[in-house]
Every structure is written in structure tokens, then in C-alpha cells.
Amino acid sequence: MGIPQNQGEFHDDIKLFLETQLANDFTGISHAKTQCTEGDHGRIEERRLWLVNNIGWLRARHPQWHTLGGIAVVESWREEQGKSASYERRYFITSHRDKSADFIACAIRSHWHIETKLHWQLDVSFGEDGQRLRSGHAAENMALMNKIALNLLKNEKTVKVGVKTKRQKAGWDNGYMLKVLTGGFTSV
């Protein structure tokens, strides 16, 4: 998982350590590395991952993270036709102490895919990208409500249509809306 940024020193310690190691090409540090290049639809993306499992120093400094198995940094470069190239560096933690860099890279890609798929579904079904909520916690609260509604609509299986259509049906039919909200439970 990505390093929680609300963890202050923990986040900073990992970032500083990995940035220092990158600058020194991980000289003298036991690590694993993997890289891959993918391209389709006019887009080329190259990713490199470095994994360090020998992190007793980090667990000693942050005992609440005693189950931590490793830390990783991923650098990615993306080029798309007609767009400027982009570069990104992200930091990750894992509880796996004995997994390969390839395994961790695959787990990270799977996590990104799930996040992207959820964002796409929320945007298509609820128009999240078009919402203009700005004051207080309104945007955060609405995003949470949309995720709850998405789960309720996906769990309703009596109608074989998409989430957007189920949402419209629930708006037009109070009986169907009740079925969605109660998860199909009937009174005893």
C-alpha cells in the first residue's frame, strides 16, 4: 500500500531513506529491482521498482509498524501521443517479508487497477468528475455517499441492468429504492 502521509515521521523516514538510496544506486544495500515497459493505444509506460526488506532500523524507530515487511519505491515514465511526457515517484510499504520485487510490482499494479476502475464507475454512474462541491467536507462526504450507493446498487441483483439504470429506477420507483436500501431483506 502507499505510505500513509498522515504518519508524519514514518512517511518522511521512508521517503528520505529511499531517495538517498536512489541517489547512491542502492550501493551496499540489499535490495531487489524489477522493471517493465508497456505500450498500447499510443501510450508507452516504463516502471521501475526497488524493494528493500532489511528494515529492522525502521521497525525499531517506529515500533507500531512491527509487522512491516518491506518498503519500495516505484518510478514511472509515461509518454502519450500529443501529450508531454510525465514522471512520477511513489513510495510503498508491504507486510510481505519474503516476496519478490515482481510480486510487489504486480500487487501495486492490481491496486492501481482497482482504484482506477472504481473512479471510472463512480464518474460514469454518479458524474463525480463534474461535481463542484467545495465548501467544508462536502466533497468528501458526497464521495463517501456515492461509494455506499454504488455498493448497494451493485448488490441488488433482481434487475439485470447497469448501475446508472438501477440508480434511475430507484429514483422513479419507491418500491425498488426500498429494495436497494434494504438489500432485499423482507419484514419478518
Image (cartoon, grey):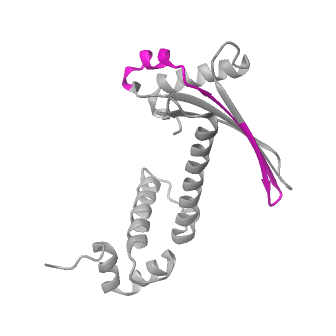
**Residue farthest to the left, as pictured:** 188
13 and 141: which one is in front? 13
Q: Quadrant of the C terminus?
A: bottom left
Q: Is residue 60 left or right of residue 109?
A: left
Count of numbered marks? 0
For image coordinates 70% across by 35% down, the residue present is 34
152 and 126: which one is in front? 152
185 up-or-down from 151: above or below = below
For image coordinates 68% across by 30% down, the residue present is 33
Q: Is residue 152 left or right of residue 134?
A: left
178 up-or-down from 85: above or below = below
**Residue farthest to the top, as pictured:** 28
Q: Is residue 34 left or right of residue 15?
A: right
- Tell me residue 105's x, y (percent): 62, 40
- Tell me residue 54's x, y (percent): 54, 19
The quadrant holding residue 42 is: bottom right
Magenta stretch: give its range.
35-64
For image coordinates 72% across by 16% down, the residue present is 24
The quadrant holding residue 131 is: bottom right
151 up-or-down from 46: above or below = below
Is 69 contained in the magenta span? no
- Tell me residue 128's x, y (percent): 54, 63
- Tell me residue 155's x, y (percent): 39, 71
For image coordinates 37% across by 25% down, the residue present is 64
